[in-house]
Amino acid sequence: PMPPPEPPHPPNPPAPPPFAPAPPSPPPLKPGGLTGDPHLHFAHGGEADFRGEDGYLYAMLHHSGLAVNVLFEACAFFLSDLVLKVRGTFVTDVFIKAVTEATGRTVRIEFTPNMPPTPIVHGLEGGTRRVLPGRPPLVVEDLSIAVTQNDNTEVLHVRTGGWAIDATARLIQRSATSGKKQVDLSFAPLRDPLAPNPKTGKVVAPHGLIGQSFDGDNIAIDGKKDHYRELWWRQTSFKANEITTEAQAEGAIEGFADDYKVADFYATDFKYRRFNAVEAAPRNVATLTGAKRVTSPGSQYDWKKSKGGTSGDDSPDKAG
């Protein structure tokens, strides 16, 4: 059958309610990561959007002795070129649980930019401690925690024996909630995440919404994305100046969005749990329905080139 005709070009909508000028655009992210609504950036270059559910926590990267969970919050913002109000969600808080390799000490880090002081580190000798911007890193065996800051962003830097994790807090651009901050995430392995454990000889592949993409191949997988003009037509026939995001990274992740919910800030139990796993194979990419492409034809998998993360839905390139 012939494809349906494209919707007509919309009329010029009336101006939205007044709002404060947008802050400067954030710096470009490293390849891979998480930004905005958020947009998921996978290890080999694939992308998808993930709305999540307001007030729920999701597993973003889980591996042996490491859990990175995030809180999603609903927050509307205005799209600059379409003068359209978008009801999206953002990652607003990050919670990291890490076990040191030398002694097995459990350290917990909370990064809550909308509820300072932050970040706070728990599990230290002598109790909790805040990490201050510009100070030397807080080092606990193979774990280091530092904060850098400029006029527009505050970045939490966490380094474990196996991972480099950056969480960048910034204002949501054109937000309907004045002063609201969101967090972009970046993950990069510091060693091969699929290498056998030297003590057991077994492999534990990482998982989570982003973690699963570190799967040992050169295949980028794109999942469902929110295209605002399409949503505007389908949800309102261009008659209203407000839309709601929908995509849940369908096609690019194993299972469903609810499979990645965790019960509390530092929880490690979810469908694809890895924190205490003895052995776990990488996901089966063949079962995923998203668009696939080989990113480095003829080249072997190189873990050093794999990075992932998230970014915000308020990015200026989402009007399509």
Image (cartoon, helix red, strand yellow):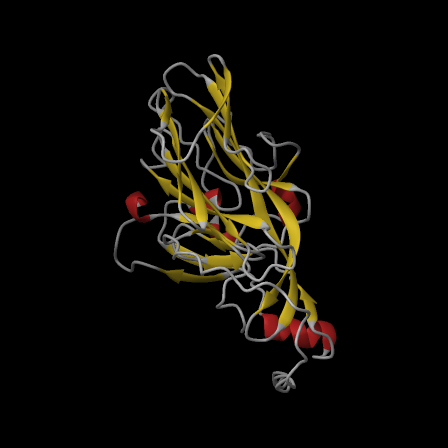
Number of dots carrying numbers = 0
Q: Residue 44: x percent and y percent?
A: 38, 53
Would residue 297 appear left or right of 114 to someone viewing this image? left
Which residue corresponds to the image point at 58% horizontal and 54% vertical from the top-left?
Answer: 50
Q: Residue 270: x percent and y percent?
A: 61, 35
Q: Nearer the viewer, residue 272 or 145?
A: 145
Q: Residue 230: x percent and y percent?
A: 62, 74
Quarter of the view holding residue 84: bottom right
Which residue corresponds to the image point at 56% horizontal and 36% vertical from the top-left?
Answer: 116
Q: Is residue 312 above or below residue 187?
A: below
Would residue 257 appear left or right of 206 to someone viewing this image? right
Q: Nearer the viewer, residue 300 or 184?
A: 184
Which residue corresponds to the image point at 54% horizontal and 41% vertical from the top-left?
Answer: 113
Quarter of the image that includes the C terminus: bottom right
Which residue corresponds to the image point at 37% horizontal and 28% vertical from the top-left?
Answer: 144
Q: Is residue 140 above or below residue 27?
A: above
Quarter of the image that includes the N terminus: bottom right
Q: Is residue 121 above or below residue 44?
A: above
Q: Residue 8: x percent and y percent?
A: 64, 87
Q: Nearer the viewer, residue 156 or 171?
A: 171
